[in-house]
Image: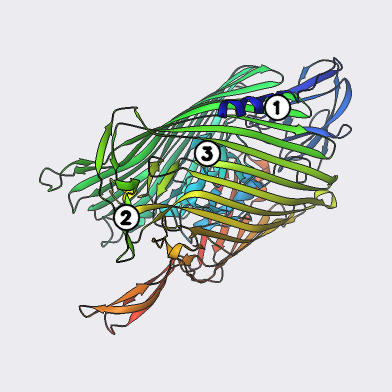
Amino acid sequence: MITKKISLFLIIIFTTFTSFSQDKFTLSGTIKDSKNNETLIGVNIYIPALKIGTTTNEYGFYSITVPRGEHQIEISYIGYQTIQQTINLNQNTKNNFYISESGEELQEVIITDNKGKINIKSPEMSVNKLSISTIKKMPVVLGEVDVLKSILLLPGVTNAGEGASGFNVRGGGADQNLILLDEATIFNSSHVFGFFSVFNPDAIKDLKLYKGGIPARFGGRASSVLEIYQKDGSSKDFHVNGGIGLISSRLLVEGPIVKDKGSFLIGGRASYAHLFLKLSEDNKDNSAYFYDLNAKFSYKLNDNNSLYLSGYFGRDVFSLNKSFTNIYGNSTLNLRWNHLYSNKLFSNLSLIYSDYYYGLDLDFVGFKWDSGIKNYNIKYDFKHYISDKFKLNYGLNGIYYEFNPGTIKPSSTDSGINPDQLDKKYAFEPSVYLDAENQLSKKITVAYGLRYSLFYRLGSSTVNYYDNNSPVVFNSDMQIYEKGTPASTKYFGKNKVIQDYNNLEPRLAISYQLNEDQSIKASYNRMAQYLQLISNTSSPTPLDVWMPSDNYIKPQIADQVALGYFRNIKGGDYSLEVETFYKKIQNRLDYIDGADLIANNAIEQVILNGRMRAYGLEIMVKKNTGKFNGWISYTLSRSEQQTPGRTPEEIGINDGQWYSSAYDKTHNLAVTSAYNLNEKWSFGANFVLQSGQPVTYPNGQYEYLGITVPSYGLRNENRLPAYHHLDISATLTPRKNKDRNWKGEWVFSIYNLYNRSNAASINFRQNSDTGINEAVRFSIFGIVPAVSYNFKF
């Protein structure tokens, strides 16, 4: 049945191909930064007279087929000068364009001001792009430029609290976001337990967040995709840039391996706040720091073939008196081959390795704990420019996973701890996809696709089996859920299939152009997520464990629809985006009361399969031009979870009713602005206001052995106080920078200007003096001034 569906889908796609006359020719090539030959992603190539266009792919390649004759080409990209050039096409032609950030005159082109217009015609929606230059102007905590903190200013995106790890998109959990760095999966995106992200802004070229309307080439997560690409490095000249801040410093070196053919980029970043701890006698044995390394090597073999090797390595180290040491971090490696089969067919083959490691050394107890997840991924993607009105993306990939829930080792010969290994788990996830973008008329453009994914939970492993297939049993007398007792076990040898799943994941987006400046768009996508993060916290922690779907943990299936109105105002000086969405997710994990998640070799005994839903309205108004620019975003939304009883006798979680998920933020307002006073001074400001995070407060108390113990009500029926802060920054760029190779700037910032004590949590305890229960607010940051110095040469 599935094979028939796929065959029918392919027939529908290919029967839409149109014949081409000999009077049409293809213009193709790459678009690069004129200063360093860096390829640029998402550059718009437009022919005004024909009202057709295209964009560059992830490697800067473009292809457009147009009638024979003379055409004026317009090339625009945010942060760069728009150029116009006349091309005479009488044969298939390769033409590489070079565009500049500055006002330098380029030969044989006309330069105009570039505006950050919305692409009205494209069916792409629920997508946000941020340039690195915009991100670097945003004031952030402790003066550290942060990629992840910047996306929190976008509509539909929130965090789990101040200093919390990860981010939440349209009411989904942080584990439902697929984070890709040069196509490699990043499983933990934060340093220092959420205070900083793992992405060095100096090494980043492009950032794109998909909240909905997700193309079929992406899969494996239920809520969003954050796609980040590293710079290739300059193939023209050697350059060095970096920065010195209060908490950390960074340095990046790039240059040619072979001029105009090969390049390298190596960047490093490290914090040194722990050095100040050692100045104190009380803290000389304490330590808390992070470091990371970015590297990339690129080489153009010829006009049709290029090779890329990129990698990332990062670690966090936290130690208390050498008796407690915590080390965790990501490692990735990606080897890619770009091949141009023709001026209409571009391909990319990638071999990817990704690893997340978590280690704990408890010297005072006498054992070491190691856990983590690895994956090995091979993917082959094609982009086929059939015509100016029809484009195809298709490809396949296979991911092999290794899960280590936990390895326990004695840390010394006299330790009383016995070695133990929780069952390692293995899985394989192959998939194939086909995406099409088709301009049906002057006003209607559609994008449609299908992804077919499979998942195999593999041995070697011992699987528990339970009576009635119920690892969680309901105690009707006490009205509580309890762990079930295995009725039998079965051992599956290496690579033996324990459980398998398959899913068809259709995608559809459509744009109806009202006029040159307005359009209405709609989208639908289904996503299957086969990996689950075992965590009972609202924000991911390094100790959380990733698990594959199996007999008891079902894959999450997300369906999302969205409808939006998009408008460019005053020729693109301003833009307006309004979207409404509804998302439902099947098989969202929930936990029984008192669930023990750490070092649990039978996690199925404490979890239940529930469901989620999220819906809302997002509004974003942007000012794209002038000395003063920025945006205002507002989101009104709900995110809820439900875990009903499996039988009429069971109560489920929260009596089986819908309740606010940990990611529910009813109101989310963000304002960000930048003002360029002159060549010397520029200023930035952010304001964020969010509804308080759902929490559970006590609703009563009882006494036990003379101790007053609070009793808690239904889950997440209360909220923390509203979260808000105002941040400002000023950047000083000395005028003498113009006359020398060394260019520097001073960045002064104040986080939380009015010293708001935002509640990261509220703890309830018994006062040791009065014996009365009390609520204690825990806040992380008050007002935080910072200064940093950035340089390049």
Q: Is residue 243 left or right of residue 135?
A: left
- Marks 1 and 2, Cα distance to the nearest angstrom? 49 Å
Identify which residue is drawn at 55% across, 26% down.
396
In this view, the residue farthest toward the front is 648
* Pointer 1 residue: 13
- Position of residue 35 measured from the top left corner of the image (x, y, whole percent): 67, 32
- SS at badge 2: strand
Q: Is residue 235 visible?
A: no
In this view, the residue farthest toward the bottom is 770
The amino acid sitting under disc 3 is Leu
The amino acid sitting under disc 2 is Val
Q: Please rate how many residues cluster around mark 2, counting C-alpha atoms within 10 Å: few if below 14, some from 14 to 19, many from 20.
A: some
- Position of residue 560 measured from the top left corner of the image (x, y, whole percent): 61, 48
Picture quarter containing residue 131? top right
Q: Is residue 332 left or right of residue 327?
A: right
Q: Nearer the viewer, residue 195 or 477?
A: 477
- Disc sitting over residue 473 in the figure: 2
